[in-house]
Image (cartoon, helix red, strand yellow):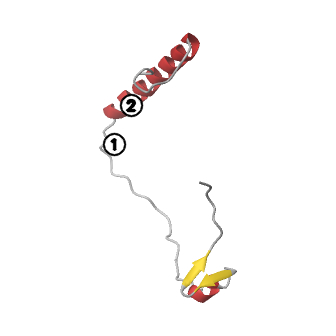
């Protein structure tokens, strides 16, 4: 697999990678056995929270920006090339 991915691994790294991949494949093998259905119906009790709509408006958000270009809000560049 390391050759296909064009990785250069020494023997110790290759053995560690093999052990990690073996554990990962064993985990996925166990997941395939799981059906997700226990045969029992689950019910939850409790009270639901009451959500509401906050009326902040776009104007409040726009005030947080220092630079604007017409209808566009300008933010500093966050990713480098």
**Along the polypeptide, which appears first: circle 1 or circle 2?**
2
Does 8 appear above or below 79? above
Q: Label 1 neighbourhood size at 10 Å, few (<14), some (14-19), many (20+)?
A: few
Q: Label 2 neighbourhood size at 10 Å, few (<14), some (14-19), many (20+)?
A: few
x, y percentage for residue 3? 42, 20
**Residue extending furthest top?**
11
x, y percentage for residue 26? 41, 24
Disc 1 + disc 2, Cβ < 8 Å? no
Using the image, tell me which numbered label, if any, was put on residue 28.
2
Using the image, tell me which numbered label, if any, was put on residue 36.
1
Determine the secondary structure under disc 1: loop
Name the quadrant containing residue 28.
top left
x, y percentage for residue 81? 59, 54
Determine the secondary structure under disc 2: helix
Does 26 appear above or below 74? above
Does 75 appear above or below 20? below
Q: CA distance from mark 1 to mark 2?
A: 14 Å
């Amino acid at each position: 697999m390391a050759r296909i991915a064009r990785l250069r691994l020494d023997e110790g790294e290759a053995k560690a990678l093999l052990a990690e991949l073996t554990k990962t494949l064993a985990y996925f093998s166990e997941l395939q056995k799981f059906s997700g259905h226990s045969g029992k119906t689950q019910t939850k009790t409790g009270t639901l929270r009451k959500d509401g709509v906050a009326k902040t408006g776009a104007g409040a958000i726009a005030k947080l920006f220092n630079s604007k270009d017409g209808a566009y809000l300008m933010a500093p560049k966050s990713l480098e090339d």
